[in-house]
Amino acid sequence: MKIFKQTTLALAVSLACTMPAISQETENGALSSAEQEAGLERITVTAQRRAQSIQDVPISIATLSGEEFDSLFSGGGDILELAVRVPGLYAETSNGRVAPRFYIRGLGNTDFDLAASQPVSIIMDDVVMENVVLKSFPLFDIQQVEVIRGPQGTLFGRNTTAGIIKFDSVKPTDDFDAYVKAGFGSFDTINIEGAVGGKLGENLSGRFSVLSQTRSDYIDNIASDEGDAIGGFDEQAWRGQLLFTPTDDLSILAQLHGRDLNGTASVFRANVFTRGSNDLNENYKRDEVIYDGNLNGNGFDNNPQEYEGFGGSFKVDYDMGDITITSITAFEEAEGFSLGDIDGGFGNADDFTPDPRPGFIPFSAVTQDNLDNLDQFTQEVRIASDTDEALQWQAGVFYFDSSFDITSTDGFFGASTVFHENTTWAVFGQASYELSEKLTITGGLRYTDDEKSLEVGQQNVDGFALVIGAAQVQDYDPVNVDDGQTSFELSANYKLSDDVSLFARFANGFRAQSIQGRDIAFEGNPSVADAETINSIEAGFKADLLDDTLRLNAAVFAYEVDDIQLSAIGGANNGNSLLNADKGRAFGFEVDAQYLVTEYFVLTAGFSYNDTEIQDDNLLVAPCGANCTVTDPIIDGLALVDGNPFPQAPETIFNFTARYAIPVGDNGELFAYTDWAFQGETNLFLYESVEFTTDDNFEGGLRLGYENFEHNYTVALFGRNITDEDNVRGAVDFNNLTGIVNQPRIFGIEGRINFF
């Protein structure tokens, strides 16, 4: 049931990258922006595996924390809420609340398979989340998010050619603290989060955090008698941590976490574009679809999705005086499934004809993907210097092992199962040397060996295509690939003054070779892509100006990727195949700004520009199977994509936030906070077409509330996508003009209380 009437709002302000904490303690220990020091907070990051000021790290970095992070997720959103909230960062999916796809500086991977590799690595509490399902673990009780742009192959390994997104949760301390946060909004959205932590015994502290996000179905499937059939979700997650410090030199942090998701996969919408236009047409209705998906013959399935996961880590830090030894052991498990009515409508071959039918659909297409037996194990050991000397260094070894099964079930071909395995080991080192008080240079080196294999199990043995002779059981040999690569980096940081520094960085990295078994489900062959390597150069400045009230960080970059891995998605056969292009090149810049206008008024803004290009004179891919307007040259029915931009790479991103507070008495304030994000022209596929290009997408958020510092509580009204924009985020192009659209407007109320 929709519990809030939707109302159109228009605001003139918007969002960016980092909302500074600008408060100081009051007499009772609370925090108040009304009694702050004049100046922006110093931000500490761990982009180089040691704590440093963000202004001293020779890498382009943006952070998210505090109010701007909480505001993004107030409406029950998932990790995709980070898209375009940082200059250069984009994210999308065609798999609901699992399997997000991230892009930094235009570089990413549109592969929708559950075995897809990505050039943006997700690091959660020092542990790499390699599989796309693991990347979607819910975000709650987060201390800080770091978006680290550019190749990070030295310290973080392969598959970081675009960069990393690093999430750090709040850790246990001896001091008691707890909070409860609850929000209620449109479509029966309920968002509850809480944590409690503190001292448990002699040298032992702990913290336990929970998250519950639910939303009722709000989209009608008008092909059935069931109203409000699609769009809801029920997501539960938790995290428990114990910190044991038997001596001043030794700390042991143990963590366990889990999730349980029951909801809706992506909502595909048939024929929502008219040929020759990328505008949504009359077939698009936010709260209606016409689905005939009934894979199991038990009525309308309505795109269900269920996933669960469990994992943990064991981190040991031992201070030996001049060096520190760190060991991180971790494991992850996950399983689940998603089912989608891929054609997004009601096929014309079906007997039942709803009215109105969403355009011509030659045939129905329903696909279910199951991920089973996902097991990931990682072990890392690092040794790092711990002195005040000019030379700082660290070295380590890393081991990774992962295996999982994927079963893809098509309504015509039946079910097929493939088994994936991946083993990686690496040795690495990095050193920084302070040549003078102004100049520091850093260099790093890493060698990685990566092995992958794919074996085919069950093959389409229960499909209708096999029964009528349109398909046959294939004989597939196992596929094995193995490669070893060296990554390196060299950077310099020069301090013009205590408040202004310049940096330059040259970095090399690689994305390991990939195997794709998706086409086996449709009587095709597995595909393999060789490893891609990137050479990237960037330079920039970081400055704290106007008595620390203005922070201005900017960087320019250029990179070239040899043998860039791409995924040919869709076309008339709805394929998904890996390929390598000769090169991919890009250049651009990012600007991140924060300005403390007054002690009660804070602005942030960010802008990025990415110019990306595929370079391969002979690269041909299948264009859309639907009747779209392809603008590339067509050769023997295939599109020549040489010179095209990378898929899902926004040319520009702009974001902006504003916060204004009015003191109320000695211990409270009224506040207004707004955030906005704008996404420039974006090509959805490898080929270019009129229909599958987006431009001028934007979304805004708003919070109006009261905060009491004496009693440590906040109450606020919130809105997400407050102007109810209908933004196309993706598409399916094989038998009609199907689109994927953003989440609807959410209004609600939220309260939080802290205990100390």
Image (spheres, rainbow, N blue to C red):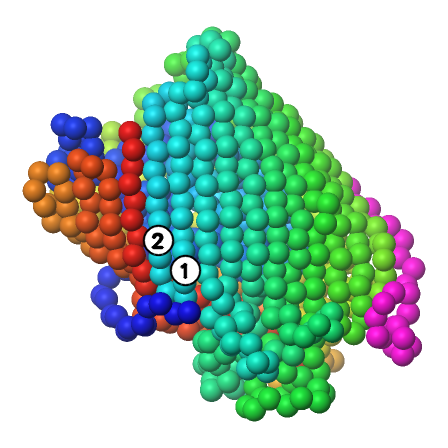
Image location (x, y in percent) of residue 95: 59, 61
Total marks in image: 2
Q: Name the residue under label 2.
A: 183
For badge 1, the amino acid type reads Thr
Q: Say which element carries label 1.
A: strand
Residue at the image point whose x is 7% and y is 42% from the top:
665
Q: Do the residues labelled 1 and 2 touch (CB within 8 Å)?
A: yes
Residue 426 spot, x, y in % from top left: 66, 31
Q: In the picture, which quadrant includes the C terminus?
A: top left
Magenta range is 461-484
Question: Does 498 sit above or below residue 725?
Answer: above
Residue 453 or residue 638, whichever sits in front: 453
Disc 1 target residue:
189
Query: Which quadrant does the N terminus fall into?
Result: bottom left
Residue 189 seen in the current view? yes
Q: In which quarter of the image is residue 622?
A: bottom right
36 relative position to 278: left or right:
left
Residue type at numbered disc 2: Gly
Q: Report x, y in % for residue 50.
A: 45, 26
Q: Which of 546 and 256 is in front in this view?
A: 256
